[in-house]
């Protein structure tokens, strides 16, 4: 599991970031003693550091420079300031990303994932499997008993979300949120239409009652 | 300088001359001088007197008109004592001294007001910077605890954020030179970022979104364009109609790319169209029920002007379309080869 260290002095943001990141499968540690930041980084050995700029004691830039003297780990700057000067500084000092508050959590998570992939070349899941059904991400195909059906972008993303949360009930709003975060702007009606199409395609490959509707709650596999 | 008034002012001098003339006349007549002699003396005196008066009058008038012209052409009129020649007459020098005192007090006052303004602007920027922390905290809290309540909160947070961004850009709009950087930007990315910034508001209003912008690269400041698009999207949400729809498209033209954002909302009345970019203009729509600062489009126009982006609006009864024209000048394409 990838380890992320958070250096952020606002307590609420720190706690919520921890919740967000652990909910997305990361092991998270938040610095609380800002006079010992570097020591804590060395002790925790994270895969990635999230760094605020305005901090008590040494500011984010100084900390970044110091980290760079002993490590190349990805550093994501998060800050309220969005001046070009700050962005330039963060790049010059070796930061890998610069995200302004209030952050778009989808973008933050995506950037973290991208940086980790680049730095540690972890193998990406190429397919999901559930109950004998395989979802091929690269080729955008759903497969059952040797039969394949091609999926559109929307359909692939919807199924990706369902597979990722396989067995759990996925609220309609959450699915739509996920699609929007992936730049697919479907509304509630369009979601129903897409699910109907998915079911159609599933039926054609002999897969019946795969995507189930939980009345008033959402969909599930 | 009023000639009539000048003459009136000279009346004492003229009277003194006349009294002198009278006295001399009596004296000359008493000494047995002939009337012709006396008349001759007084004619000469009279001619000298009127010539002197006229010459002095015209010289004075010319000097004063020059001074008036100088004052008219000067933009900062309170600086006139710096530019004019120091007068040589004793009484004028006193007036000059007084003018210098007035100028000094004016400059001090202006300096004080400018400092006050600068401090206030810095405070506003600082405030905006600080308020982003609780906004971020609330946003994270809501996103970690999703529910319909949380979604409504998130929509309102987006509103708050838009207002703080507007305040930030307004505070900065006076000195925009210091804060923009032109670099290669993918219009597609900016459009998606702007939509993401208004995610919950758009969802809440059931906006249907269609995009026809593919990999269009222009040279501009992506943050500013994102702000401009946010204003446009905000307006589309505010002034929407039934079954609202928002459409983004980019079209290549001879010398650039035009990004169009069109909606099917209540539109802008023809009478308001010429004024929508004026500061503080809320128009008919802004006043009927919906709150409007009148600053959003004003800032858009200002920023577009600074970046060299053409800004055009089209609205006929229903729906509004806003077009941003980005130039792809020869220098840029030449460099790219």
Image (cartoon, grey):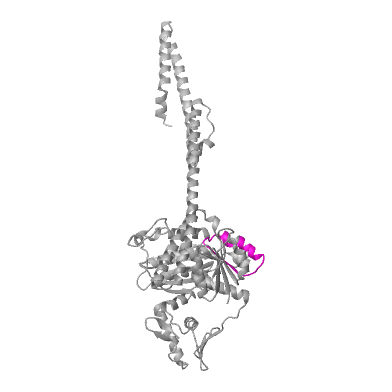
In front: A16, or B181? A16
Boundaries of the magenta span? A62-89
In front: A19, or A142? A19
Is residue A86 one of those drawn in magenta?
yes
| Direction from residue B13 to residue A138 in the image, left or right | right
In x, y percent, where is residue A95?
60, 66
| Direction from residue A165 to residue A124 in the image, left or right | right
Vertical order, B33 against B257 (above or below): above
Figure quadrant of the N terminus of chain B = top left
Location of residue B280 by image quarter? bottom left
Q: Is residue B18 visible?
A: yes
Vertical order, B303 against B146 (above or below): above
In front: A221, or A25? A25
Figure quadrant of the C terminus of chain B = bottom right
Total label count?
Answer: 0
Is residue B93 one of those drawn in magenta?
no
In x, y percent, where is residue B102?
48, 35
In x, y percent, where is residue B175?
52, 53
Vertical order, A221 against A90 (above or below): below
Q: Is residue B336 visible?
A: no
């Amino acid at each position: 599991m990838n380890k992320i260290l958070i250096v952020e002095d606002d307590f609420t943001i720190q706690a919520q970031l921890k919740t967000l990141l652990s909910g997305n499968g990361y092991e998270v540690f938040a610095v609380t003693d800002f006079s010992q930041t570097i020591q804590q980084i060395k002790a925790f050995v994270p895969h990635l550091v999230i760094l605020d700029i305005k901090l008590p004691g040494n500011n984010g830039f100084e900390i970044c420079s110091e980290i760079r003297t002993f490590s190349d780990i990805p550093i994501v700057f998060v800050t309220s300031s969005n001046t070009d000067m700050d962005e330039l500084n963060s790049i010059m000092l070796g930061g890998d990303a610069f995200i302004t508050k209030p952050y778009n959590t989808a973008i933050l998570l995506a950037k973290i994932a991208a940086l980790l992939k680049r730095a540690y070349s972890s193998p990406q899941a190429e397919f999901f499997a559930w109950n004998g059904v395989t979802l091929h991400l690269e080729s955008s195909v759903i497969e059952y008993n040797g039969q394949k059906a091609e999926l559109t972008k929307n359909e692939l993303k919807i199924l990706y979300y369902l597979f990722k949360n396989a067995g759990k009930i996925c609220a309609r709003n959450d699915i739509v949120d996920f699609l929007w975060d992936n730049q697919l702007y479907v509304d509630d009606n369009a979601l129903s239409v897409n699910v109907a199409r998915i079911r159609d395609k599933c039926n054609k490959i002999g897969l019946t009652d795969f995507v189930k509707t939980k009345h008033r709650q959402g969909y599930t596999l | 300088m009023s000639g009539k008034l000048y003459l009136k002012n000279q009346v004492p001098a003229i009277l003194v001359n006349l009294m002198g003339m009278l006295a001399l006349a009596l004296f000359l007549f008493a000494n047995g001088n002939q009337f012709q002699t006396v008349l001759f003396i007084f004619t000469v005196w009279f001619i000298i007197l009127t010539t002197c008066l006229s010459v002095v009058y015209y010289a004075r008038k010319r000097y004063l008109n020059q001074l008036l012209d100088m004052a008219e052409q000067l933009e900062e009129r309170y600086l006139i004592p710096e530019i004019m020649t120091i007068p040589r007459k004793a009484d004028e020098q006193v007036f000059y001294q007084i003018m210098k005192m007035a100028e000094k007090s004016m400059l001090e006052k202006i300096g004080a007001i400018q400092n006050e303004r600068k401090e206030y602007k810095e405070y506003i920027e600082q405030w905006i910077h600080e308020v982003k922390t609780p906004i971020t905290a609330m946003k994270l809290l809501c996103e970690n605890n999703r529910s319909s309540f949380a979604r409504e909160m998130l929509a309102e947070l987006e509103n708050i954020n838009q207002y703080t961004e507007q305040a930030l850009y307004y505070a900065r709009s006076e000195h925009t030179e210091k804060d923009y950087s032109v670099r290669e930007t993918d219009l597609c990315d900016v459009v998606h970022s702007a939509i993401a910034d208004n995610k919950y508001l758009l969802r809440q209003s059931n906006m249907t979104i269609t995009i026809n912008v593919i990999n269009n690269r222009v040279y501009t400041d992506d943050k500013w364009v994102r702000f401009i698009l946010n204003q446009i999207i905000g307006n589309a949400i505010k002034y929407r109609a039934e079954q609202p729809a928002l459409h983004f498209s980019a079209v290549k033209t001879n010398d650039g790319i035009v990004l169009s954002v069109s909606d099917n909302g209540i539109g802008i009345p023809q009478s308001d169209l010429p004024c929508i970019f004026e500061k503080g203009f809320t128009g008919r729509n802004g006043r009927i029920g919906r709150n409007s600062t009148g600053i959003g489009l004003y800032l858009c126009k200002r920023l577009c002007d600074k970046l060299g982006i053409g800004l055009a609006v089209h609205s006929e009864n229903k729906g509004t379309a806003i077009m941003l024209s980005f130039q792809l000048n020869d220098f840029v394409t030449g460099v790219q080869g």
